[in-house]
Image (tube, coloured by chain):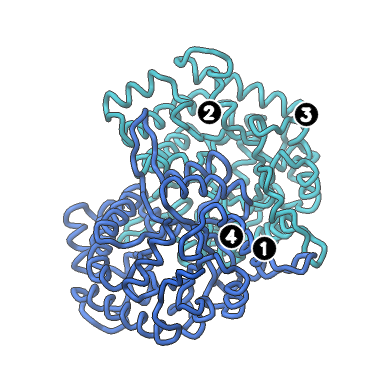
Chain colours: A blue, B cyan
């Protein structure tokens, strides 16, 4: 099962983190941008080419340290179809280098439409009996606001193609409480309801290490809720944003982990992508700087939560 | 303001409906598919070309009857980047024919990431001081689960580029109640909270006919909730899915309208796209069949809710 593959990668590299590939043009060193513009002009195509080159350098530098990458779909759509092509190429390149890929698309819809998203991002697209992988990620972030009608099509595709999903529960942003923290008449919060749906939906995709193919997104910026949900949702693996640039530290992410140092994967985007700028290194060393930051983050988190091990007892 | 432009188009054509462009390959007549495959092969490119040709024929046939089209992003992403290119080309073609375009993407994220979605789908993309329209729709559907952090970036882009959004409130699917109908400890339902957020957020984008640039998605399959929200949200224009194939009829959508016959635009996708199949007409007449169905739908709804007029008093 897809989530099992992620857990195995995490255990093999002893690193429960994921590098977010949110490539704003301003993060990309001059030499890569100029090379792309020279070939494709200062256009959407040129920008997309610069992004792809930037990502390839990062993946080369990170693939033996970090188990997974998480491209954020918005930063590719920003550059139109050439940007979306760069997303597909980035996913393929990360796979070639052995990385697990989580597309952060927060997709949501119902029935046949959700099935189209699932086939596009995780499964295969049929064209007159021929099958193509449009994007081919290993997991996709999704928004569960529409209920099981929006999740069931994903579960079918995940089961068939060995893929997983992460459902938004408690997001890392300041206003996430506007809806998510509201208390229902039954006494539960909205984020808790979404979390419990993950447990229910996850029964369709059981994993051999106790965590199902239905994960949840729970932000590092709300450690209390992270702790509550970790206890309440024993079969739900967490994708934890908000570490680093958004203010969460190793102590804040710790409550997302179980006693084996498993149970969560922590995302960092800007701190890794912009490491060369933050440490005043020349643009040519952006990948080395990213690798150094990824190692620093790994060590900080592992020191706090322990070396992740596969708990096969559960 | 963008929503004003939609209202003016609706009043000019006396038609409060929108044609959903959800082009599954099986809806596309043989002659269009074969022509595309002959040029591009039975590939994602070939499928995307067939979709674009299909959409152009529909837009030609509908543009003097229907004020707006609503391409559903999932059906374009399904065909990878060539499909996403077909989405951009479809939007451009619809604009050339004078139609208002709502991209149904249900996008959601926070801060800079949501800004990237907003710039991509509604605004402009900067590449080294040059500006490009990546997709350029007039409005985008969005999911408000993340709160104002996910909406504020959209409001800025809408204000700057004269665009609008539709926030999911009560969706048309059977399981929409799993979360949306839950009652909070304060006595309100989750969908009502989202609806009231639309009123609040909409104050940033006031419109001259009383409806703001922040609309809501409210399904035709829940006429009681539609009625409740129409009364509660006087400045929020509704995008109403669920008419036709999902079971809602003219009487079900009627509660979404105000006394001027305004206040809502009703979507139909499959019934229009597949009209040629449902009426056993040859594939060559698919656009004529779509036009006939669009006129039938217009007449049915207008008979029930009245001819839409711009209420300038509000």
Element class at badge 1:
helix
C-alpha span from label 2 to label 1? 44 Å
Indicate whether A284 appears above or below A117: below
What's the chain of the residue with tag 2?
A: B
- Residue A147 location, x and y as percent? 63, 51
| Residue B7 appears in the rendering | yes
**Mark 2, residues whose alpha carbon is within 10 Å: few (<14), some, or many (≥20)?**
many
Classed neighbour count for the residue bearing mark 1: other residues with Cα under 10 Å, few (<14), some (14–19), many (≥20): some
Which of label 2 and label 4 is nearer to you? 4
Q: Residues within 10 Å of mark 3 (few under 14, many from 20)?
A: some
What residue would you read off at disc 4?
A198
Q: Judge whether residue B118 can be spotted in this image.
A: no
SS of the residue under disc 2 = loop
Relative to residue A89, is residue A107 drawn left or right?
right
Chain of residue at mark 1: A
**Chain for disc number 3:** B
Q: Is residue B193 left or right of residue A102?
A: right
| Residue position marked by numbered label 3 in the rendering | B304
Which numbered dot is residue A307?
none
Residue B89 figure quarter:
top left
Task: State which tag comes first along the sequence, 1 or 4.
Answer: 1
Q: Are marks 3 and 4 on the same chain?
A: no
Give the residue at mark 1: A193
> Marks 3 and 2: in contact by CB < 8 Å?
no
Report x, y in % for residue B59.
49, 28
Mark 2 vs mark 4, CA separation in Å: 43 Å
Query: Of residues A230 and A32, which is closer to you in this image?
Result: A230
| Residue ID at (52%, 58%) | A214
Residue B63's disc is 2
**Helix, strand or loop under label 3:** helix
């Amino acid at each position: 099962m897809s989530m099992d593959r992620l857990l195995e990668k995490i255990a093999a590299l002893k690193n429960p983190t994921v590098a977010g590939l949110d490539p704003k043009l301003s993060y990309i060193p001059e030499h890569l941008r100029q090379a792309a513009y020279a070939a494709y002009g200062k256009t959407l195509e040129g920008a997309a080419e610069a992004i792809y080159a930037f990502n390839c350098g990062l993946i080369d530098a990170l693939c033996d340290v970090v188990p997974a990458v998480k491209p954020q779909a918005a930063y590719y759509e920003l550059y139109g179809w050439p940007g979306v092509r760069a997303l597909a190429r980035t996913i393929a390149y990360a796979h070639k280098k052995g990385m697990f890929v989580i597309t952060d698309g927060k997709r949501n819809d119902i029935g046949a439409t959700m099935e189209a998203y699932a086939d596009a991002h995780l499964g295969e697209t049929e064209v007159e009996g021929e099958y193509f992988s449009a994007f081919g990620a290993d997991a996709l972030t999704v928004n569960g606001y529409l209920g099981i009608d929006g999740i069931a099509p994903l579960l079918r595709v995940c089961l068939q193609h060995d893929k997983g999903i992460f459902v938004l529960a408690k997001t890392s942003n300041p206003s996430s409480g506007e809806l998510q923290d509201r208390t229902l008449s039954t006494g539960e919060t909205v984020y808790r309801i979404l979390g419990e749906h993950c447990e229910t939906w996850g029964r369709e995709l059981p994993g051999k290490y106790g965590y199902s193919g239905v994960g949840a997104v729970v932000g590092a910026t709300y450690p209390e809720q992270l702790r509550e949900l970790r206890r309440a949702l024993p079969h739900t693996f967490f994708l934890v944003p908000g570490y680093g640039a958004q203010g969460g530290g190793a102590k804040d992410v710790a409550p997302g982990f179980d006693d084996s140092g498993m149970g969560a994967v922590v995302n960092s985007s800007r701190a890794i992508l912009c490491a060369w700028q933050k440490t005043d290194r020349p643009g040519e060393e952006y990948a080395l700087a990213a690798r150094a930051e990824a190692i620093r983050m790994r060590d900080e988190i592992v020191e706090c939560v322990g070396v992740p091990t596969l708990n096969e007892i559960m």
